[in-house]
Image: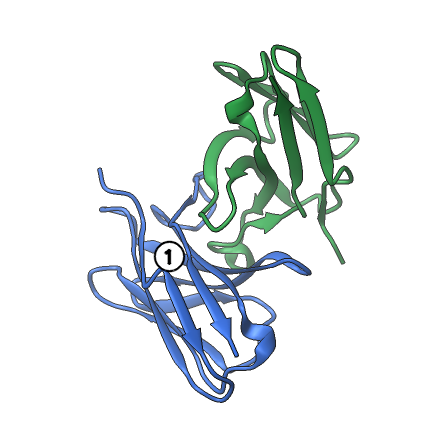
Chain colours: A blue, B green
């Protein structure tokens, strides 16, 4: 079974631009979560999607948004980029994400975003 | 408010010896705990997990212990190998709609295993 894939792997943008990152979950997984990793804040939860609906959201500004498609693939978008948005963005998938059954999240390799 | 804490930023052990990585949590709603291994610029790789109804789970060289009363868990690696050198993250999840798809991570512990 193929793992979680993320594209692109690396991105360089300038302040004020916007960026879209893509994530394809493991086949059969319907929940997709996004995380931001920075040296100062560690791994922080951005949001989660299931059946094309955002079910949960972390403490990030509205510039961070996402969506999920009917095939469970997900994208996240960051508008009006700031220097502090430079980070490794990680996508993870699980079967349902509800926690009703204790599920493991499996992570993709991440997208390294550098904002200049 | 850091709900999951890994108080040791780094740990150095000799090949063949035991590595013990520790993690503390404060949220009593957490009921599932996971350990991930991570190399720089890569995604975390799942290692082992434990449900709150258990106090121990083993998988090969890896064993996770959970002490619910102390809100503490630990990962034991025996024997340690140089290839185990990486950053290890403890993570926790809870049931309920406010926790859908959300893992709360510790800050990580850098493990170095010397040959």
- Residue visible at 52% across and 54% down in the picture: B102
Can residue A74 be spotted in the picture?
A: yes
- The quadrant where residue A100 appears: top left
Residue A93 shown left or right of residue B65 in the figure: left
Can residue B23 be spotted in the picture?
A: no
Residue A110 shown left or right of residue B28 in the figure: left
Q: Quadrant of the N terminus of chain B?
A: bottom right
- Mark 1 falls on what kind of element? strand
- Rendered position, B22 above or below A87: above
- Residue B83 placement (x, y as % from top left): 50, 25
- Residue visible at 43% across and 40% down in the picture: A103
Q: Quadrant of the C terminus of chain B?
A: top right
- Residue B14 placement (x, y as % from top left): 67, 16
- Rendered position, B74 above or below B44: above
- Rendered position, B48 above or below A87: above
Callout count = 1
Q: Dot 1 corresponds to which residue? A: A32
- The quadrant where residue A105 appears: top left
């Amino acid at each position: 079974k193929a793992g979680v894939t993320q594209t692109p792997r690396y991105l360089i943008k300038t302040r004020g631009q916007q960026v879209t990152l893509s994530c394809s979950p493991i086949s059969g997984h319907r929940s997709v979560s996004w995380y931001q990793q920075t040296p100062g804040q560690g791994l922080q939860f951005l949001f989660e999607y299931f059946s094309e609906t955002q079910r949960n959201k972390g403490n990030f500004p509205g510039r961070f948004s996402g969506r999920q498609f009917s095939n469970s693939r997900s994208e996240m978008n960051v508008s009006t980029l700031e220097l502090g948005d430079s980070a490794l963005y990680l996508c993870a998938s699980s079967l349902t994400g509800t926690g009703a059954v204790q599920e493991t999240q499996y992570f993709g390799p991440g997208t390294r975003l550098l904002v200049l | 408010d850091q709900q999951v804490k890994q108080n040791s930023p780094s740990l150095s052990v000799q090949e063949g010896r035991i590595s013990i990585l520790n993690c503390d949590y404060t949220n009593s709603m957490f009921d599932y705990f996971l350990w991930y291994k991570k190399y720089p610029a890569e995604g975390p790789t799942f290692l082992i997990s434990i449900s709150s109804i258990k106090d121990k789970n083993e998988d090969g060289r890896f064993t996770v212990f959970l002490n619910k009363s102390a809100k503490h868990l630990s990962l034991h690696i025996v024997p340690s190998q140089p290839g185990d050198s990486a950053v290890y993250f403890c993570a926790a999840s809870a049931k309920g709609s406010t926790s859908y798809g959300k893992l709360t991570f510790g800050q990580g512990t850098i493990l170095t295993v010397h040959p």
